[in-house]
Amino acid sequence: MTGRTRIAVIGVGNDFRRDDGAGWAVVDRLRERAVERPLPAGTVLATCDGDPARLITLWEGADLAVVVDAAHAHPAHPGRVHRLDLDAGLLARPAGSSHGLGLGEAVELARVLGRLPGRLVVFAVEGADSSLGTGLSTPVEATVDPLATSVEQEIVRHRDAAARNRER
């Protein structure tokens, strides 16, 4: 990312593993909405397969990074969304991603390398089906619009807080 990029929204997953595509679906929805309601300048919408090096590259230099990823939980409640905020220290051991390696390793590696974003918010969506195929399960699909709204709200809160800090 360049120095001008202040906000990174990253959908993590695999569009060909059903609910594992939840993060990509949320980023797609944000792109659709941005036509009518543009996001703040410097906001980057990206998708990633979860590779730690690619994640770090996408959020490096950002004041705020919002990551949306599918997660496994036991017992599972498909469509349940968990919000984790690195500022709150809740990401020491992230919820299990639906990928073998990924977000947890990226956070730890970025921490060691000093390449974490200023603030990292993770939305983890519990999935129902990660089999081969396209399309989200009904409970996960139902989270896409509300989750896109939650991401927009994170961006607005960040923008407003940054503006207040500049005024001081």
Image: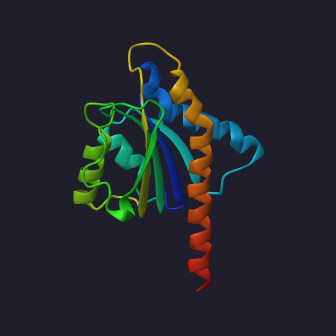
Location of residue 104 (image quadrant): top left
Task: Indicate the position of residue 129 as horizontal and vertical percent values.
Answer: 41, 20
Expressed as whole percent of the image width and height from the top left, the position of residue 2 reads 49, 56
In this view, the residue in front, 16 or 123, is 123
Residue 15, placed above or below residue 161: above
Left or right, residue 142 beside residue 47 = right
Q: Position of residue 141 (x, y in %)?
A: 56, 27
Quadrant housing residue 26:
top right
State the residue in front, 49 or 82. 82
What colour scheme was applied to this rendering of the protein?
rainbow
Query: 146 or 97, which is in the foreground?
Result: 146
User: How many tags in the picture?
Assistant: 0
Residue at x 28% of width, y 62% of height: 114
Image vertical order of residue 17 relative to residue 93, above or below = above
Query: 125 left or right of 28?
Result: left
Residue drawn where x is 50% and y is 51% of the image: 8
Residue under the point 36% across and 64% down: 88
Q: Which of the pair 80/121 is nearer the observer?
A: 80
* Viewport quadrant of the C terminus: bottom right
